[in-house]
Image (spheres, rainbow, N blue to C red):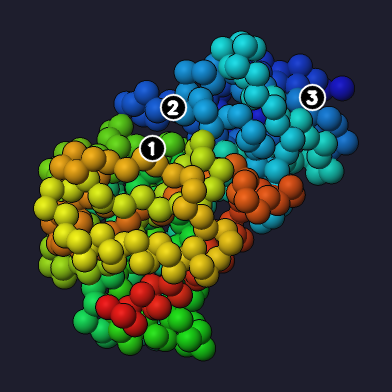
Amino acid sequence: MSDIQIDCAFDSGNIEVLSTDGASARLALRKDHMSEFRQWFHFRVSGAAGRELELKIADLNASAYPGGWTDYDACVSEDRAYWGRASSTFDKDEDGGTLTISYASDSDIAYFAYFAPYSMERHHDLVAESALCEGVSYRRLGTTLDGQPVDCLEMGEGDKQVWLYARQHPGETQAEWWMEGALECLTDPADPVGRSLRQKCSLHIVPNCNPDGSRRGHLRTNAVGTNLNREWESPSAEKSPEVLCIRDAMDETGVDFAMDVHGDEAIPAVFLAGFEGIAGLKDEQQADYLRYRSILERRTPDFQTALGYGITPPGKAKLTMSTTQLAHRFGCCSMTLEMPFKDNRDLPDPEQGWSPERCKLLARECLASLAEWLEIN
């Protein structure tokens, strides 16, 4: 029987084929361009029907987040619509750290990815469909180094300036699935959460802050290897035009509430990170953040506060990161939302793990929490 074939020459594709033997393959991750980051993969296997695939991705002890591979199952799809999980095991002692993916395919073609991909074509569909909705305006904030637009959708007539932005790190595709759920809620004329927020807020939504990295199949950086979430103190047209144009737009409107949407490789939970370490932190600012977190925890069992990042000591915050920069710059309530690449430890789903569907459901709960939070503010 012939060897399987493996391809990644498509939007967000990333893998290197070291060897194939029948239904088995040895693979490696490709680094982000001009960067040492590597963790994202997305590839297609053909010649798979009726075969027990064994796909080994090697040298993962040197990946960006080696702790992300333990208890992780790769995402798999045969129709590119429904993404399940393929049984995977990680052996840190095999070939520099190896993830072995095992899968029996019914189709001749199967796709594998670190998380369910969110293509630039789907992004353009999302932006175009949202811009057609009543009360929504489109704004092109700027262009990337590869010449792609930085898209922003705006809606609402309230005084509160709300910024929602996602996918600074392009391999964290959970973030744009979340954005799809958020935009479906906000543009649905029958949804009471969306209606309430459009009355109370002026919403500015950037579904994808890093189109170049997304299309190139990067984990964490843009076209020239820049980690955008370390550029917010002094962005430049040469290294980080995406951040520069978004921050300039924020300066025009001001910011009362901001959420930066991400995915976390190692922690098997949904959690928030705040801005505790900024100089001059106001008590009411911190109270606003904690109150929002408490509302979200009450609203959905997919969110928790036991797992997450450590608290930064006073005065030690990195103002290069968007959440801390915005809290410092505008005195607003800002936060980073993190979703898992793995399953949610507290509410596991053996078929899909954390999934696009759950990202979208979480988005509506985040917006409903914002609507409740605004009732007191």
Q: Is 38 displayed left or right of 277 in the figure?
A: right
The residue that disc 3 covers is: 23
Q: Is 171 displayed left or right of 49 in the figure?
A: left
Say what secondary structure mark 2 lies in: loop
Per the rendering, the mark at residue 64 is 2
Which quadrant would the N terminus be assigned to in this image? top right
Residue located at (43% from left, 64% from top): 294
The amino acid sitting under disc 2 is: Ala
Q: Nearer the viewer, mark 3 or mark 1?
A: 1
Q: Nearer the viewer, mark 3 or mark 2?
A: 2
Q: Earlier in the sequence, mark 3 or mark 1?
A: 3
Of residues 243 and 163, the one nearer the viewer is 163
Q: Is residue 36 above or below residue 87?
A: above
Q: Is residue 261 above or below residue 108?
A: below
Q: Is residue 185 above or below residue 247?
A: below
Of residues 178 and 331, the one nearer the viewer is 331
Residue located at (47% from left, 53% from top): 305
Contact (Cβ within 8 Å) of mark 3 with mark 1: no
Q: Residues within 10 Å of mark 1 (few under 14, many from 20)?
A: many
